Amino acid sequence: MKNVFLIIFSAFIIIPGYSQIEYPYPLPNKQQLAWQEAELGVVFHYDLHVFDGKRYGQGNNRISPFPDYQLFNPENLDTDQWVKAAKDAGAKFAILTATHETGFALYQSEVNPYCLKAVKWRDGKGDVIRDFVNSCRKYGLKPGIYIGIRWDSFFGVHNFKVNGEGEFQLKRQEYYNKMVEGMVTELCTNYGELFEIWFDGGADHPDNGAPDVLPIVKQYQPNCLFYHNLQLAEARWGGSESGTVPYPCWATFPNFYSHAGDTHKEHIELLKHGDPNGKYWMPAMSDAPLRGINGRHEWFWEPGDEENIYPLASLVDMYYKSVGRNSTLILGLTPNPQGLMPQGDVLRLKEFGDEINARFSVPIASVSGEGDEIILKLSKKQAVNHIIIQEDIKLGERVREYKVEALSGGKWQLLCKGKSIGNKRIQQFNPVRTNKLKLTITGSVSSPVIKSFNTYFIENP
């Protein structure tokens, strides 16, 4: 197996403030650490079929070339507005589909003729990726790019394979692979430092005849999270598109790519929960489209979906069950044919960001520490009903079990308990009046290092 980039899981590492220690368990690399600490991001889906006024049909879209690519005409394109909406939601990074299943590229490509050079919009000189990246940097979000190479209805590609037989197929496959590798090189070299490269449906393996993309990303974007192919996954899908993961959710995994388990059911369970004894650091992503209720689940803008935006309460619940369970939440956003985020979506994103900020930006009390017991002292006796615990994950996931108690009536009262903590664990419990909380680590693989232990009181949670 060539070009395999493995995550080292046992090494001597020196970290400022800590002595040299051998870690017999996985540690995140710098791009994984940044990705987890970001906690919330968005992905903007944009493609030709946004402009045809019809419902999106994925199956047909993967096999039928789009009939008229000149429909692409976002007259009021404003990526500043897109990114500002994401920032208002609390997102720390944003991703845009450079290509999706039509094969159409939203930038000025020298290797793929099916791109913005071919349309009349902006006289063939438009570059949505360039606008998007500039907007991200303007508003302080880290830009990422989503690349669809598994399906391409224009070039007749399905599951990485170009249609055809014999020598005809081999030559066309060779051309497609070279084109894709050229596109990945363009995207990795023309737009500055990227936060994440997301290959839609993975990127297979060059030994299977697929494009050889991993070395390109590692050469030109060494600080970028790679997600993913059969050689490497620096993150994993969390097993559903609900924006949530079940608990516990460990950041470690048994394989160096996100495929494990003898059956489909076992594979999905591993994606959802991870494996506390896994040899590889591979944190979970929770993704969901913002327009996802009333039986809808739309990653692209479609007419008549304005009533299908998740209500605020659902988004808050999603946050608790993703970020609050050691997973990174990515919301799918849908710019419209005019090139704008719809106003209802923009307002809901701001409501969401404001609500999370109101709940968790200022704790009643906070402490950090190392060891099996940490005491959190409040300035006075008062009601609390939430805690947030964070491990210092650059040192790995050390905690295996814990409990939180409050001093009440002269006795320690159990409030909550759990298993994984990782980057962030949010728990809610019935209100209790206290001036002292205690976190006890009842199981660990090494001395626990708690980055923060915070408590809050939230009205009508």
Image (tube, rainbow, N blue to C red):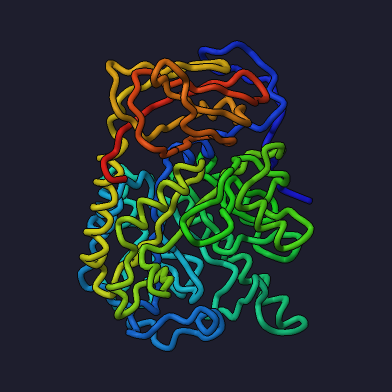
- Looking at the image, which is closer to me, 244 or 3? 244
Outermost residue to the front: 409
- Which residue is painted at 28% across and 24% down in the image? 382
Residue 48 position (above or below residue 438): below
Counting from the top left corner in percent of width and height, residue 210 is at 68, 64
Residue 237 position (above or below residue 444): below
Counting from the top left corner in percent of width and height, residue 396 is at 60, 29
Counting from the top left corner in percent of width and height, residue 93 is at 38, 47
Which quadrant of the rendered structure holds the C terminus?
A: top left
- Which residue is painted at 23% across and 65% down in the image? 344
- Quarter assignment of residue 361: top left
Visible in this render: residue 384?
Answer: yes
312 relative position to 177: left or right: left
Residue 243 position (above or below residue 69): above
Counting from the top left corner in percent of width and height, residue 101 is at 51, 73
- Looking at the image, which is closer to me, 341 or 73? 341
- Quarter assignment of residue 208: bottom right
- Which residue is painted at 68% across and 25% down in the image? 445
- Looking at the image, which is closer to me, 72 or 114? 72
340 relative position to 146: left or right: left
Visible in this render: residue 218?
Answer: no
